[in-house]
Amino acid sequence: MSEYDDTLYKELVEHQQDMLVKFSPEGRLLFVNTAYCDLVGKTKEELAGSVFMPATDQRYSEVMATQMTKLFRPPFACQVEQWISSPQRPRCISWSARSITDGKGGVTAIVATGRDITRLRREHRAIRKRDEELMLLLESGTQMYFTHTPDHALRYVSPRIRAILGGTSRSGKRLWTDYLTDNPLNARGLERTLKAISSGRREPPYRLEFYGRNATKIWVEVNEIPVVKNKKTVAIAGYLIDVTEKKKVEEGLIEAEILLKGYGSQKKGGGETAGEAVRGPFSALKSIFSSEKTDEEEDIPLDIPANLR
């Protein structure tokens, strides 16, 4: 090799930002470039013969050891990440390593290139933290969010929906329609979804009855909007509100209204005046739950505050 070639290789190795190292199969450094020396704050003389990756955090050591075993069998290459201490505070280095073999499967040395990805890792960590905070905010309200494709395949389901339905993809159900009961009212909701998909316009909220955990039935109110790209609906996004208890109350009020109407009709038929027949729900209910006392019954005192008597 000519002197020109030696100079060229030296410039390529010493004047790049990536770190270059060579170490023995036992992990002892045989060569380091200037970028690696600058990172760890030591000279080449100080690093010569020292253990490569000595500052790895304990929680990463087992993962790194597992990955580096690939250097001693085909394909004799691996990629690992390492957090190390440096004068510039802890840095995360992504290493790409490959073994030098003797042609018979024996490893004589290992060369590796490293790139500082600290900023990228911290950005990912910040994004993950924001995502967790956003998810906490979303999951703390009454709304439970979801998205599905125009053919009803689930894309995203919030953890709370998974909890009340008893799982989604893991249960073998891929379409949100798989959870619908045979209640005839569900057909109306499905019609609104299909209309939103075809028109690309938002439909009013509607209710559906789903099968939940242990075959329980759950009523939800659905608020959704089509996601349109290039004048075509590509997804449906929205949220659910559990209205099961509200539905029970509404059904109870309807039954009470029917009962009160029937009671009023009976009173009118019995010769009661119109003014007495329309005394109001409270008076009617009071009459329903009161009756003439028998000789065997006793008066039960009611602890009613004086201001309500």
Image (spheres, grey):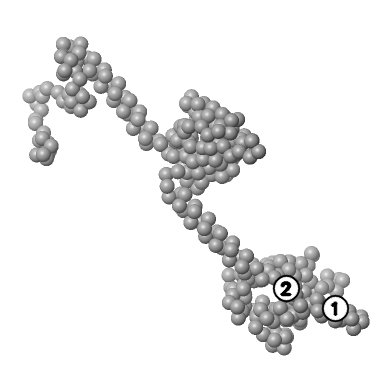
Q: How many angstroms separate mark 2 from mark 1 (CA)?
A: 17 Å
Indicate the position of residue 25 as horizontal and vertical percent values: 75, 77
Q: Name the residue carrying label 2.
A: 18
| Element carrying mark 1 | helix
Which quarter shows the C terminus?
A: top left
Q: Amino acid at mark 2?
A: Asp
Judging depth in this view, the residue of 45 and 13 nearest the camera is 13
Q: Is residue 240 above or below residue 292?
A: below
Residue at figure coordinates x 22%, y 25% from the top left: 281
Q: Kindly indicate the quadrant of the structure image that contains residue 102.
A: bottom right
Give the crowd class for mark 2: few <14, some 14-19, many >=20 residues within 10 Å.
Answer: some
Three-letter amino acid code of the residue under disc 1: Leu
Q: Please name the residue shown 50% across and 44% down the image.
A: 145
In the picture provided, is 175 more to the left or to the right than 144?
right
Q: Which residue is mark 1?
A: 8
- Crowd class of label 1 (few under 14; some 14 to 19; many from 20; radius 10 Å): few
Say whether residue 109 is visible: no
Note whether 270 is above or below 61 in the view shown: above
* Badge 2 or badge 1: first in the primary sequence: 1
Question: Residue 62's x, y, as percent?
Answer: 63, 69
